[in-house]
Image (cartoon, grey):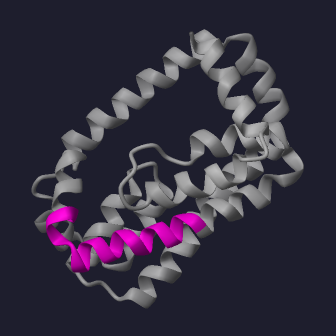
Amino acid sequence: MFRKLYEWVMGLARSRHAPASLFVVSFAESSFFPIPPDVMLAPMVLANRNKAFVYAGICTIASVLGGLLGYAIGVFLEPVGQFILNVFGHPEGKAEFQKWFDEWGLGVILVKGLTPIPYKLVTITAGFAQFSLFTFIWASIVTRGARFFLVAAILKYFGPAMLEEFERRLNLYSVLLLILLVSGIVAIKVFL
């Protein structure tokens, strides 16, 4: 099962529609979509390492634009924003994140933008808090860019060796990745 899914993703990553799909996923993930763009970015870079930084740029631009949509949801569509927070397990998210923005402001965006914590939580709650839009934009560019360009660089320079090892033990790494994903979701629910 994992082999077929892996081959499908790698095939999509090589397709002529891959950059547009990457843009859409990156945009949507910053405001409402649950799947991070890394699941497309990684195989795309591995499929065409010469375009690693182009793909990272697509992720960054789309993520920041999607972040602006998330911010707008927080400012203008509060019930929709609250619904999205509920779906992602944060029914008290507005008050919780408002406190974070009041205490740490810019630090929330800088730290959360680099981590795998769903960025939509930051974008929507930044809108709720009516955090400085200018600061939100430049901090999003810095953190999202750093994250995606770092992933692209690691895969560009170390990807072939990593890919060979991953393909050799695909089932093992797939199970480990699934365990890490579930552990991360549990940790987010417990600690946030």
Q: Residue furthest right?
A: 50
Residue 127, image quadrant: bottom left
In this rendering, the answer to whether 149 lies above or below 189 is: below
Q: Main secondary structure of the magenta part?
A: helix
Q: Quadrant of residue 183?
A: top left
Image quarter (top left, top right, bottom left or bottom right) of the N terminus? top right
Q: Nearer the viewer, residue 88 or 163?
A: 88
Q: Is residue 62 left or right of residue 69?
A: right
Q: Is residue 14 magenta?
A: no
- Is residue 78 found left or right of 115 in the rendered image? left
How many numbered marks have been drawn onto this rendered protein structure?
0
Residue 80 magenta:
yes
Q: Residue at x 44, y 90 (%)?
A: 134
Picture layout, residue 155 above or below residue 74: above
Q: Position of residue 168 (x, y in %)?
A: 75, 11
x and y percentages locating residue 39 in the rendered image? 58, 39
Q: Residue at 57% x, 65% y: name it.
A: 62
Q: Residue 166 or 86: which is nearer the viewer?
A: 86
Q: Residue at x 32, y 77 (%)?
A: 72
* In the foreground, 81 or 116: 81
Q: Which residues are magenta?
A: 62-81
Viewed as shown, does residue 73 lie left or right of 58?
A: left
Query: Which residue is rendered at x = 66% and y = 30% of the image?
Result: 9
Q: Residue furthest front?
A: 17
Residue 103, x across and y down, in percent: 22, 77
Name the image quarter holding residue 5. Answer: top right
Foreground pick, 87 / 18? 18
Residue 99, percent from left and from top: 16, 72
